[in-house]
């Protein structure tokens, strides 16, 4: 008879494999730290490259702004080619002379605009048809200041562009013929045919006032600041209907955006040039 003997061994070291597990954990931590450092280094390298390219784009846009200023003031032909290739791969898009603002235009009325003949003036006309109507059907002016004591006085003048007296139509604050009534629905009791007060937005009446306009005529807006504070304002214009936003002419200056691209780093300058 063959006797089979079975032997059972008991592991007297319950910590076996811990070293391997710790090694894996340490290696994982080192790998995570390495990836983190690599990500940080990559971001820094990319940022450094952007800074280097940005410098060329900024100098490129600044250099072209001098050319733009010269050409706009001299009214030279062939304003600019489609693009301008400068040194070190700096490309500047063709600068375009703007004659209009955005449909929602923000500005300030200084304390010096305290009487009619010193008031802030905005013209409404069609730059492509100076002898025709403005094409504007409605205008809204909002007083963006907060607090009391910041009221504005606003005149809206409307005249026929073919009128022989158009040059003096809006120079007389007592002229009943040309002033447009504000909308009575906006400010209760606003029946003055020359002006109304525009209150701050946190007051009653509301902080804006509106006028319906004749799009076949031209308009001029005069805003007077009778306070001792600079007042921010917002002007919204609409045409040819009362609900369609329409850009307001940029009077007294032109705006030329200059965009320079240096291998992906893009920088833009907005050059504002007075007409006089």
Image: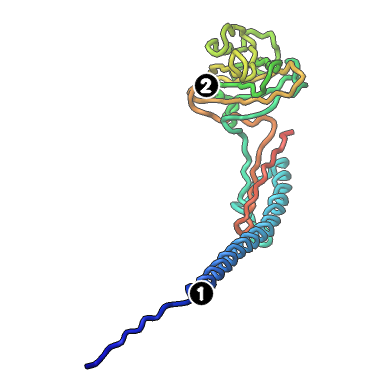
Q: Mark 1 or mark 2: name the one nearer the start of the chain.
A: 1
Name the front one of labels 1 and 2. 1
In this rendered view, identify the residue nearer to me: 226 or 154.
226
Instruction: Check disc 2 and report its element: helix, strand or loop.
Output: loop
Please tell me whether residue 106 is drawn above or below residue 77 in the rendered image: above
Q: Provide residue 16's location: percent of width, then percent of height.
A: 48, 75
Residue on which disc 2 sits? 137
From the viewer's side, name the closer residue of 63 and 126.
Answer: 63
Question: Picture coordinates of residue 132 (x, y %)?
Answer: 56, 24
**Whether residue 85 can be seen here:** no
Q: Residue at x 55, y 70 (%)?
A: 27
Residue 122, image quadrant: top right
Quadrant in which the C terminus appears: top right
Q: Which mark is residue 20?
A: 1
Quadrant placement of the N terminus: bottom left
Distance between mark 1 and mark 2 Cα atoms: 81 Å
Q: Is residue 194 above or below residue 106?
A: above
């Amino acid at each position: 008879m063959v006797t089979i003997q079975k032997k059972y061994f008991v592991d007297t070291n319950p910590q076996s494999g811990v070293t391997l597990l710790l090694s894996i954990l340490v290696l994982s931590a080192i790998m995570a730290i390495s990836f983190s450092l690599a990500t940080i280094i990559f971001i820094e390298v990319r940022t450094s490259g952007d800074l280097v390219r940005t410098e060329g784009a900024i100098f490129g846009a600044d250099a072209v702004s001098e050319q733009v200023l010269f050409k706009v003031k001299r009214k030279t032909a062939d304003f600019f080619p489609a693009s301008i290739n400068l040194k070190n791969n700096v490309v500047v898009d063709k600068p375009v002379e703007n004659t209009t603002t955005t449909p929602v235009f923000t500005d300030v009325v200084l304390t010096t605009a305290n009487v009619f003949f010193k008031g802030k003036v905005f013209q409404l006309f069609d730059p492509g048809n100076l002898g025709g109507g403005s094409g504007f059907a409605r205008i809204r002016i909002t007083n963006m200041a907060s607090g009391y004591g910041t009221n504005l006085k606003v005149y809206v003048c409307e005249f026929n562009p073919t009128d022989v007296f158009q040059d003096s139509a809006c120079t007389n604050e007592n002229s009943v013929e040309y002033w447009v009534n504000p909308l009575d629905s906006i400010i209760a009791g606003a029946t003055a045919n020359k002006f109304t007060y525009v209150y701050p937005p946190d007051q009653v009446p509301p902080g804006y006032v509106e006028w319906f306009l004749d799009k076949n005529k031209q308009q001029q807006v005069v805003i007077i600041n009778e306070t001792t504070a600079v007042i921010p304002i917002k002007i919204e214009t609409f045409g040819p209907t009362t609900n369609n936003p329409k850009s307001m002419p940029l009077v007294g200056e032109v705006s030329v955006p200059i965009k320079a691209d240096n291998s992906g780093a893009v920088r833009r300058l907005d050059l504002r040039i007075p007409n006089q």
